[in-house]
Amino acid sequence: MDDARTTYLAGKQARTCDVDEAEARARTIGTARLFIAVGAVALLVAGVWGPLGEVAGLGVALCVVAFGALVVVHARVHAAAERARLALRFHERGLARLEDGWRAFTNDGARFALEDHPYADDLDIFGPASLFQRIDATETRFGEARLGAWLSAASDPVDLDVIRERQAAVKDLAPRASFRERLSAEGVVESKPDPSPFLTWAEGAAPFEDAGRWKLAALGLPALAIAGACASQVAHVSAWAWVGPVLVELLVLGVTARHVAPIAGAVSSRQGAFARYGAMLATIQSESFEAPMLRELQKKLRASGAEATTEMARLERILSFLDARNNEVWRFFIGPVLLWDLNCAIALEAWRVRAGIHARAWLEVIGEVEALSSLAGLAFERPEYAYPVIETTPLFIAEGLGHPLIDVGRRVDNDVSLPGPGAVLVITGSNMSGKSTLLRAIGVNVVLALAGAPVCAGRLNLGPVRVASSMRVRDSLSEGVSRFYAEVRKLKAVLERARASRVPATLFLLDEVLHGTNSRERLIGARAIVRELVACGAMGGVSTHDLALGDLETELPGSAINVHFEEQVEGDRMTFDHKLRSGVVQSSNALRIMKMVGIDVVKID
């Protein structure tokens, strides 16, 4: 953590200086543009009503050229300032994660939460104060979608080789803080814009079929207008020499608007900053990776037949010209004379025909690298986390297991052992002692491990498992579903997964089973559920206040293991050490907690 904090503090200081310098350059260029615009107006007035005549016309032309050049340069300086701000944000967010300030991050992945997912809601994978919010470092929709998919996949069949390959990639990326900074800084701005319009256009859903026929007019008419303007000033040719071509240009703009507007809307970097993908691809392509998975991703950028970095750089240049239209002077006075939008649309259509079909594959590479970089950031910031050893048979054996979403100063670690199929921890304990937290710690760390990330443990051996849980149960007034019925449906889903697969084994996490019914039926039902899960070769943990459920250790020898948490009482003060102990708990604290909050049980009785 000290190395990560040092890196982020130094990076924050350096990028703050970069932002200040870029903003100063932008102000200087903006001032120069203002002076040039004023000078052009003054020369025009002097040429029409003053003595300068032909010289004024030449001066106005030079001012127009200089103004146009500064517009392009200004856009690039603004882009550099934006990249510097994003690089600064990279370091600020890193420091926030180190200081447990990540809960203030705006993107919590809530859009990936599915109502009937086997574990995501129970384990806080998405939403406020979630695992996704803690580790997400993506800047594109493709990146966050890939990360969300990995964190959602711990209930799916397991490919052990893919997990090991991701681990190697994460290990490779973890110390590459400068690479991850550049990738983030080059990322798309404006709240991860939706790439769908860009891809729809790039893949040819609405081609500009007449682009070739308009190319000659797009180049020839501006040349005629400029030549006519110069001739009217120098050779005293009639003003119609330039007015005529300009009128034809306006007609052309009207006719082609139905083609140009959709293209400009789909790819304008002001709307989506899609040209920034080119810089991200260049960053990925230029890095010398060691991990096989990362090298394969680099090969995909070359194997399409069109060089990704070259083509996206060309797209970026076209869009930098297109964005000049956002300047009001350019849009209404200079752009129409040069048929600017039409020329940009023709260039974009040529790019689409040549490279558009490969765009989706390129963006998927970016998404994969971003997701891996998010996991690598976790590894870099928490070097005490261990990379799990991936075994070929189902098991979960951890030393020093903790919950990665609990602040470091408050987290308590425990050893947990599920040595194989059929193993089940029967967890008893007082209220607030840590039963549910232990179950979530097991589940969240399995999710991280199967994604290829390090886990919050000193050591973890993990085999092929699929997570399924029943912990956080909600009733539904709109569907007429009681809490008990909702829990029974979740338990049925867990059992069905266990029946369907022995390898990978179902790793079940059950909290207060059948809490919504009477104690007699709850105990009978809970025993039946655990017995069937064990018979199906599932493994996991079940927390309970029913101490009689501890009899399962005798009924299922070699499978059920009793463990517990307990409170410590000193006078009227109750504390918890959250340490896992063997056996069944011998105390309870419900009445004591009621008294602590002001409910006098004796008086009620």
Image (spheres, rainbow, N blue to C red):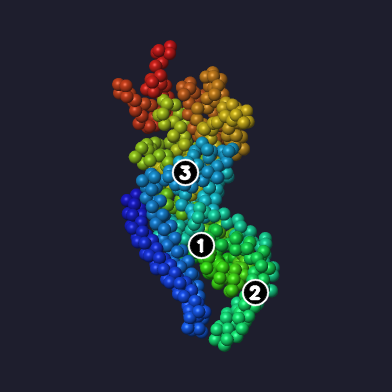
Cα distance in 3D space between marks 2 and 3: 60 Å
Q: Residue at x 57, y 44 (%)?
A: 156
On the image, the x and y values in percent for residue 493 come to 60, 34
| Residue bearing the label numbered 1 | 276
- Per the image, label 3 sits on a secondary structure element best described as helix
Q: Closest to the observer: 526 or 200?
A: 200
Residue 485 bears which disc, if any?
A: none
* Amino acid type assigned to the residue bearing label 2 in the image: Leu
Decide: few, some or many residues near mark 1? Use Cα within 10 Å; few <14, some 14-19, many ≥20.
many
Residue holding disc 2: 247
Depicted 4 relative to depicted 501: above or below: below
Q: Residues within 10 Å of mark 2 (few under 14, many from 20)?
A: some
Q: Quadrant of residue 243?
A: bottom right
Q: Nearer the viewer, residue 251 or 94?
A: 251
User: Does 454 appear above or below 402?
Assistant: below
Numbered tag placed on residue 131 in the rendering: 3
Left or right, 207 with respect to 508, comes to right
Tell me the element at label 1: helix
Q: Residues within 10 Å of mark 3 (few under 14, many from 20)?
A: many
Locate residue 480 relative to residue 385 in the image: left or right. Answer: right
Are circles 2 and 1 on residues that touch, CB within 8 Å? no
Q: Residue at 50% of width from left, 53% of height from top?
A: 191
Amino acid on which the number 1 mark rests in the picture: Arg
Residue in the image at 50% along x and 77% along y: 44
Q: Looking at the picture, tell me which residue is in the foreground, 141 or 82.
A: 82
Say which quadrant the C terminus sits in.
Answer: top left
Left or right: residue 36 compared with residue 275: left
Q: Position of residue 455 (x, y in %)?
A: 43, 45
Q: Could you say which is closer to the camera, residue 148 or residue 325?
A: 325
In whole angstroms, how far apart are the C-alphas of marks 1 and 3?
Answer: 28 Å
Q: Secondary structure at mark 2?
A: helix
Question: Mark 3 is on which residue type?
Answer: Leu
